[in-house]
Image (spheres, rainbow, N blue to C red):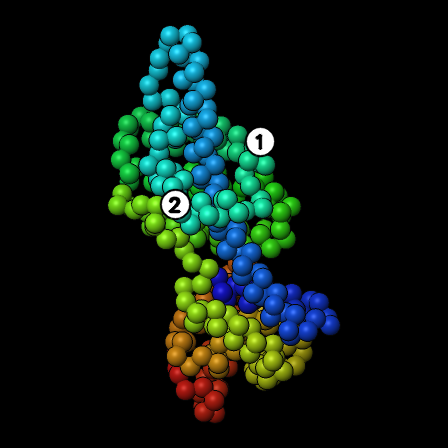
Amino acid sequence: MIRLKVVQLTYSFYQNEGKSLDVAEKELNFSMSKAYELYLYLLSLLVEIQKYAARRNEQRLAREQRSGAVSNNSSDQILACNKLLLLLKSNKALNEYIENQKAAWDEEENLVKRLYSDFIDSDIFGLYVDKADYSFAADRELIRKFYKTYVCDNEHIDSMLEDHSLYWNDDKEIIDSFVLKTIKRFTEDSNEEMPLLPEFSSDDDRRFAQDLFHATLTRDAELRGFIRDNTRNWEFNRLAVMDVIIMQIALAEILTFPTIPLSVTFNEYLDIAKVYSTPKSASYINGMLDGIVKNLHEQGIVNKTR
């Protein structure tokens, strides 16, 4: 997440001529906090699904009491009683966010209704009901499948998020992976104190983001010089802008953080290139960085080898 943010903000810096380094660094911190806000917002969608199911179930029970017809294990009751959803509903950290959030899911009632209706009519939910396995593991897997199928790559949600924040739409894909990871972390022994993923796992991560971004921008002439030296000048001028930025940041990391293994740096930026640049970028960047690092190693500038 940190490296991706640095890539996004570096690209933005070069697209906005005249932006100062100080402003850019403040924007990085703000962007990181907005990404974490999105993580909590999407987790709170699952709480809203449980609350919506509970309201529908209460309305069903009231109707049945009036008519005298009683049914068991309705779809609404099943989701209202889902063990993973109830854990999220009681989670203290998530409740603190929900109480203070500016963007609430109850303002998106039609979207929640659509998600809910699509899900309870789905084969995923039907198979879960047929198995009648209401263990914690089965409940958790049901919600994981719901999120992966109906929240990830949902154009209606993407459009709504873009209306809330320009930052959110860019972050949705990676934040989805964090939500899915969080769902998997909950166990039958979890309680309301269960910690969510932190914005930064440590102060070191915060400093890493700031130092990497600072080095990328303050050493840009040097870093781009290394890239240019490994291409003919006309080739450098024809490189995709995002390819240059990704290589520039990777080199900043290699030169600034000697304890990070080269394999880690290479893998992280090649994964970013596969998503954010051209189809052939990853293999090209891999070859370029490999050649640059070998040259820097021979010159004694870089001590670690791949």
- Crowd tier of the residue under label 1, counting other residues whose Cα lies within 10 Å: few below 14, some 14–19, many 20 or above: few
| Drawn side of residue 154 relative to residue 51, left or right | right
Q: Which mark is residue 37?
A: none
Residue 205 sits in quarter: bottom left
Asked whether the viewer can see residue 244, the reply is: yes
Mark nearer the N terminus (2 vs 1): 2
Q: In the rendering, at what x and y percent does residue 52 appear?
A: 47, 30
* Residue 115, placed above or below residue 28: above
Q: Going 48% across and 82% down the picture, which residue do you hit?
A: 255
Q: Report which residue position mark 1 lands on.
A: 110
Foreground residue among 185 and 95:
95
| Drawn side of residue 57 relative to residue 138, left or right | right
Q: Going 44% across and 13% down the picture, which residue do you hit?
A: 63
* Residue 212, placed above or below residue 46: below
Q: In the rendering, at what x and y percent does residue 8 appear?
A: 58, 63
Task: Indicate the quadrant containing the C terminus: top left, top right, bottom left or bottom right.
Answer: bottom left
| Type of amino acid under label 1 | Asn
| Type of amino acid under label 2 | Asn
Question: How much space separates mark 2 and mark 1, taking CA atoms?
Answer: 25 Å
Q: Report which residue position mark 2 lands on.
A: 91
Q: Going 39% across and 73% down the picture, which residue do you hit?
A: 263
| Drawn side of residue 225 relative to residue 302, left or right | right
Q: In the rendering, at what x and y percent does residue 207 appear?
A: 48, 73
